[in-house]
Amino acid sequence: MNKNTNPEVATGNEVGGNILSLFSVIAVKALTLAQAKARESQHGYVGLEHILWAALKLERTALQEEGDVLPLPFPVSAVNAVEQVLERENISHPSNTEKTLRWTPRGKKVLAIALRISAKKPVPLSALVSACLMEKEHQAVQAAFNEAASMLDSVRKQMGVE
């Protein structure tokens, strides 16, 4: 396992254990869940889309266990929308059956941004989500934003505010 604590310059397949020690318990669970989703999808890599999917999936757990609130309330449908993006990315990699997964440059960038922007240590799940959301052009981020916007529009209509 790579012990480099800077994810932007980490090399090899693994993000080092030293990096993970800087994140909260729930954030580490999200990164572990992202890896599991990548394996299940047989992608052979962990990218922003896997991190975002896992982080949104654990949103309620982060609130209950760590009092961590995400920067934007995402409905359950946002998790489903990101999952649909993952399913469309049915990319076959020769390494998809290996134990270790490659972290994409964008995935490493998300970790680095989360470390940089977080005022809290250990870095909470909300910082991971914020870092993902900064990549506005990524289709997984757009899918999550679209679902959140749809939910907000629905709330506005229910309240009679348009």
Image: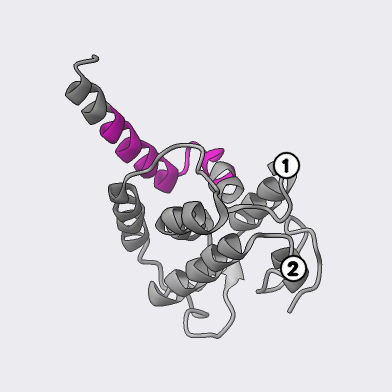
SS assignment at label 1: loop
* Start-end of magenta stretch: 131-152
> Residue at left 47%, top 85%?
97
Residue marked by disc 1 = 119
The residue type indicated by label 1 comes to Ala
Q: Main secondary structure of the magenta part?
A: helix
Q: Which label's residue is closer to the chain start, 1 or 2?
A: 2
SS assignment at label 2: loop
Q: Is residue 37 above or below residue 128?
A: below
Q: How many marks?
A: 2
Structural crowding at the residue carrying mark 2, measured as other residues with C-alpha within 10 Å and reported as few (<14), some (14–19) or many (≥20)? some
Of badges 1 and 2, the one in the foreground is: 1
Q: Is residue 141 left or right of residue 103?
A: left
How far separated are the C-alphas under marks 1 and 2? 26 Å
Residue 43 in sight from this viewpoint: no
Residue marked by disc 2 = 11
Task: Point out the residue furthest to the right here.
Answer: 4
Q: Is-magenta flag for residue 34?
A: no
Q: Quadrant of the N terminus?
A: bottom right
What is the quadrant of residue 149 in the picture?
top left
> Residue at left 26%, top 33%?
150
